[in-house]
């Protein structure tokens, strides 16, 4: 979701975001409920076919999937010990498939299309829920991830330059102060752009 | 040009008076504001679209009092911040420009045409689908300007828009500012940019100490900087 949309003209790029969100939810639920390795192998082939249809650069796909591999490096051995190799393999395949499908959605769908889909979904509840506000909250959440990552990176560099690598305070205090300042500036910018209610 | 009126305006931040009894009528095409850090120039600029409400006095734009018509005034006044990173909300360049129009209730085709025109005007068409936070500093500031101008404001206020940029990007952004037909109020330390303006206001200690054509006003500012050494 963090600005990883990759423009294209494939069937998946052109499909409505709401339909893709529905299929994503259905597919991930189906994968989670599968109890055999054979069924998961078929699902894996299907996911690969979907990636081929989307025609995305391999590097981008790899960047999306690799973080879950780090988690699996710890989780799989634990699962092998407590549940056996078959349970561990199924857990690993389910997680990789779920992450791959979510990545496929974000790589083929601009955030603005997701916001429009969310607003369409919430329209029947407009008496109780402000769809614009929910959409804005989602957009800001997505925006704040790279913004906070940049703040942490700069503070880590400053901490290193001062020779205070081990200090938690030298990391936490500037990050919190800058995060609050950034939030205030972002609020001002939203007000200036007419989002002032 | 629209009249921006400051009528005996003061503003306090806690115990500090940052703007002190300022009265001005701004009706020129391009107006610059200079002053040292803490002189009150940014606070004054922020009052033009109601980001800061004065502690006393009255600010009006085109006859509309900010205290009662802040929302209407914000539709007329676009604001460009020092750090464009704080202004970018959406992940890609095109989406961020389009974000401004979400509250304008335009039909899809009209909004898309306005976004495309804004991107083209600032040479951002090629970068339209790139992640906005990965642009260079100059490109981010141009994106911020495009995101403001897509709403077609009649006044643009910019708070030190070139301060965080290198000389090349500062010149690029300045050139774009120079070409804008809108009424422009720019807070800047970039004196070359202000030399071509119609009027320059120099602030010190929350007060206006010079208000003149750029030549004489910038001489006052240079003298002020020199005397502080």
Image (cartoon, coloured by chain):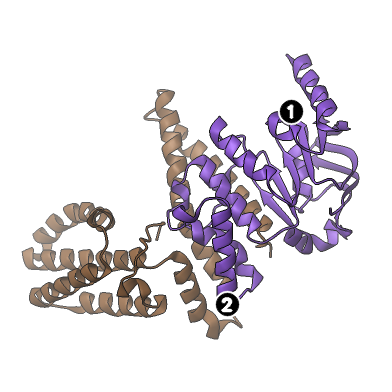
Residue sitting nearer the eye, A112 or A154: A112
Residue A149 point in image, percent of width and height: 42, 45
Residue A22 position (above or below residue B64):
below
Residue A127 point in image, percent of width and height: 61, 83
Residue A170 position (above or below residue B107):
above
Chain A shown in which color? brown
For the point 31% across and 75% down, which residue is it?
A: A11
The local crowd at label 2, few if under 14, some if 14 to 19, many if 20 or more residues have their Cα within 10 Å, is few
Disc 2 with disc 1 on a shared chain: no
Chain holding disc 1:
B
Residue B165 position (above or below residue B101):
above
Pointer 2 residue: A129
What is the C-alpha distance between the residues marked 2 and 1?
A: 47 Å
Residue A69 point in image, percent of width and height: 20, 55
Pointer 1 residue: B36
Chain holding disc 2:
A
For the point 21% across and 75% down, which residue is it?
A: A31
Quarter location, residue A101: bottom left
- Give the chain letter for purple: B
Q: Secondary structure at mark 1?
A: loop
Q: Secondary structure at mark 2?
A: loop
Residue A16 position (above or below residue B228):
below
Residue sitting nearer the eye, B17 or A8: A8
């Amino acid at each position: 979701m963090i600005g990883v949309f990759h423009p294209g003209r494939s069937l998946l790029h052109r499909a409505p975001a709401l339909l893709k969100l529905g299929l994503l939810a259905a597919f991930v639920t189906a994968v989670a409920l599968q109890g055999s390795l054979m069924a998961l192998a078929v699902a894996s082939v299907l996911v690969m076919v979907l990636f081929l249809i989307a025609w995305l650069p391999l590097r981008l796909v790899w960047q999306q999937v690799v973080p879950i591999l780090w988690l699996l490096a710890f989780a799989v051995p634990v699962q092998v010990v407590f549940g056996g190799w078959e349970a561990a393999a199924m857990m690993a395949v389910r997680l990789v498939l779920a992450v791959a499908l979510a990545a496929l959605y974000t790589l083929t769908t601009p955030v603005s299309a997701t916001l429009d889909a969310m607003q369409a979904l919430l329209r029947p509840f407009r008496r109780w829920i402000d769809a614009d506000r929910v959409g804005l909250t989602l957009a800001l959440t997505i925006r704040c991830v790279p913004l906070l990552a940049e703040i942490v990176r700069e503070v880590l560099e400053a901490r290193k330059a001062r020779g205070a690598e081990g200090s938690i305070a030298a990391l936490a205090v500037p990050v919190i102060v800058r995060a609050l300042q950034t939030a205030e500036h972002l609020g001002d910018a939203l007000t200036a752009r007419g989002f002032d209610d | 040009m629209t009249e921006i009126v400051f009528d005996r305006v003061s503003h306090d931040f806690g115990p500090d008076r940052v703007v002190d009894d300022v009265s001005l009528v701004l009706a020129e095409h391009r107006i610059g504001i200079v002053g040292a850090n803490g002189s009150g120039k940014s606070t004054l600029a922020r009052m033009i679209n109601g980001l800061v409400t004065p502690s006393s006095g009255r600010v009006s734009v085109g006859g509309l009092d900010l205290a009662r018509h802040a929302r209407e005034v914000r539709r007329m006044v676009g604001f460009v911040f020092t750090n464009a990173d704080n202004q970018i909300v959406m992940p890609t360049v095109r989406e961020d420009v389009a974000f401004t129009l979400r509250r304008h209730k335009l039909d899809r085709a009209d909004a898309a045409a306005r976004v495309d025109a804004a991107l083209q005007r600032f040479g951002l068409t090629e970068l339209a689908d790139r992640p906005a936070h990965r642009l260079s500093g100059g490109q981010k500031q141009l994106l911020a300007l495009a995101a403001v101008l897509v709403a077609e404001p009649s006044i643009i206020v910019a708070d030190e828009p070139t301060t965080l940029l290198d000389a090349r990007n500062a010149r690029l952004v300045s050139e774009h500012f120079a070409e804008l037909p809108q009424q422009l109020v720019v807070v800047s330390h970039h004196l070359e940019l202000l030399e071509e303006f119609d009027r320059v206001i120099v602030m010190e200690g929350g007060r206006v100490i010079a208000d003149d054509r750029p030549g004489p006003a910038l001489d006052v500012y240079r003298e002020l900087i020199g005397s502080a050494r």
